[in-house]
Amino acid sequence: MRLNAGIITSKLSESKAFYKDVLSFGVTFENEFYLLLHTPDKSTEISFLLPEHPTQQPLFQKAFQGQGMYLTIEVDDVDSIYADIKKKGIPMKIDIRDEPWGDRHFAIEDPNGVGIDIVHYRATEQ
């Protein structure tokens, strides 16, 4: 089983630029109303769909309202990714920090208002 999160948005070009330029995602498929991107290692995908598109059923018509969703991207070297994203001038929503439960992470926001938590999980001492 695989999961592909999808966001219904009119911001296809902004989303494509953000995920490619900021997070180094690649394009798996693209047409005038749908965009499918993949992580650099091609293990995971995220999709974007234009709202109110006539080819789609009513369930997939309404645009995302920019609240109540987040994505977590697990990485091996969170500090280097943090430094790279800071150099690109992307605003930080949560600055890099260590959590008592073992995460080292920071957060940014995509053009659709989706929070993106970029994290390295570390084992905590019991």
Image (spheres, rainbow, N blue to C red):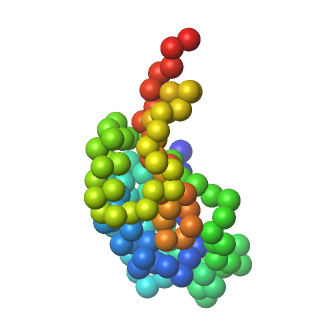
For the C terminus, which image quadrant? top right
Residue 92, visible in the rendered structure: yes
What is the x, y in percent for residue 18? Answer: 39, 68
Return the residue nearer the eye: 28 or 86. Answer: 86
Q: Is residue 107 left or right of residue 17?
A: right
Residue 41, visible in the rendered structure: no
Residue with the most extreme right position = 58
- Name the residue located 47 percent from the left edge and 21 percent from the top edge: 123
Return the residue nearer the eye: 45 or 79. Answer: 79
Whether residue 105 is situated above or below residue 5 in the rendered picture? above
Residue with the most extreme top position = 126
Whether residue 86 is situated above or below residue 56 in the rendered picture? above
Whether residue 122 is situated above or below residue 88 in the rendered picture? above
Q: Is residue 106 left or right of residue 112?
A: left
Asked which quadrant contains residue 55, the reply is bottom right
- Name the residue located 49 percent from the left edge and 71 percent from the top edge: 111
- Name the residue located 63 percent from the left edge and 58 percent from the top edge: 69
- Name the residue located 59 percent from the left edge and 85 percent from the top edge: 53
Return the residue nearer the eye: 84 or 54. Answer: 84
Return the residue nearer the eye: 112 or 99. Answer: 99
Q: How many marks?
A: 0
Q: Is residue 70 left or right of residue 18?
A: right
What is the x, y in percent for residue 67? Answer: 66, 64
